[in-house]
Image (tube, grey):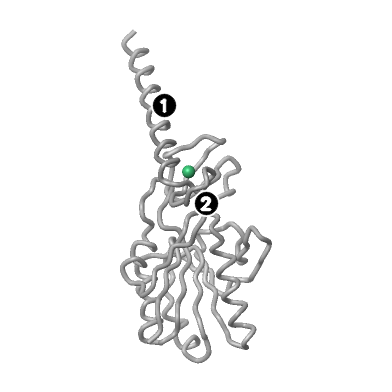
Amino acid sequence: MSKLYFRYGAMNCGKSSMLMQVAFNYNEKGRRVVVIKSSIDTKAEEYLSSRIGLKRKVDILLNPKDSLKPYYFDWKVDASCILVDEAQFLTKEQVEELWYVAKILDIPVICYGLRTDFQSKLFEGSSRLFELADEIEELVTICKCGKRAKFNARFVDGEFTLDGKSIVIDGSKANTTYEPMCGTCYLKAREAFLKKEEDWEDTRQVKLNL
Ligand SMILES: [Zn+2]
């Protein structure tokens, strides 16, 4: 039977480039791959893009409400591999369906995604993938200090933050950006952020008491 793979890493570890490389290798041998991306990621719409300049059209833009079942028959006929980008945004039901594709339809499924969000919490899709995947591989990216980056820090106007919704796509709001960080740098930035919030709250209390 085929395997369900989960290859995860922090922001900017080259997930989309790797996915496109795998797709290229299959296509070169005359084999069809199906590329899926969550519609939550509006970065490049129906295209996958990577920072090193690769670009590829997505076959299925997947809405969180969508089921993959209608595609099963077509895939069974001639798909050699299913590739999923931004797999952290999948729902747990969609991950279950991909598991079915690997195990019952016998088509390998390779999912690329982030482990955790900017508050260091597991994404729904990633959580289910950790539970079900046959093979789990961590992709390496480097923090600005040179250590391995494991976390995704969110910055608003250049300031580290823990506030806001779980999903704000990079660049969709001009002032929101992300940076891959090692545990040490992430924790230090988080401490400094919490301290600042506390100081602000103290100042507010003082003002209220005056
Ligand atoms: Zn670091």
Badge 1 marks a residue whose secondary structure is helix
Q: Nearer the viewer, mark 1 or mark 2?
A: 2
Could you say which disc has been placed on residue 75 in the image?
A: none
- What residue is drawn where x is 62% and y is 87%? 29
Q: Residue furthest right?
A: 53
Near mark 2 (Cα within 10 A), the count class, few <14, some 14-19 or many ≥20, is: some
- What residue is drawn where x is 58% and y is 82%? 26
Residue 123: image quadrant is bottom left
Observer-nearest residue: 86 or 140? 140
The span from disc 1 to disc 2 (Cα, nearest Å) is 27 Å
Badge 2 marks a residue whose secondary structure is loop
Q: Residue 167: give x, y in percent of width and height.
A: 46, 51
Residue 162: image quadrant is top left
* Amino acid under disc 2: Ile
- What residue is drawn where x is 59% and y is 48%? 171
Q: Residue 58: give x, y in percent of width and height.
A: 59, 71
Side (left or right) of 123 relative to 19: left
Could you say which disc has been placed on residue 142 in the image?
A: 2
Side (left or right) of 168 relative to 3: right
* Amino acid under disc 1: Lys
Q: If the image is split into quadrants, where does the C terminus sit?
A: top left
Side (left or right) of 156 relative to 150: right
Q: If the image is split into quadrants, where does the N terminus sit?
A: bottom left
Q: Which residue is mark 1?
A: 196
Q: Residue 160: give x, y in percent of width and height.
A: 48, 37
Q: Residue 151: give x, y in percent of width and height.
A: 44, 49
Observer-nearest residue: 193 or 187? 187
Q: Is mark 1 within 8 Å of ligand 1?
A: no
Near mark 1 (Cα within 10 A), the count class, few <14, some 14-19 or many ≥20, is: few
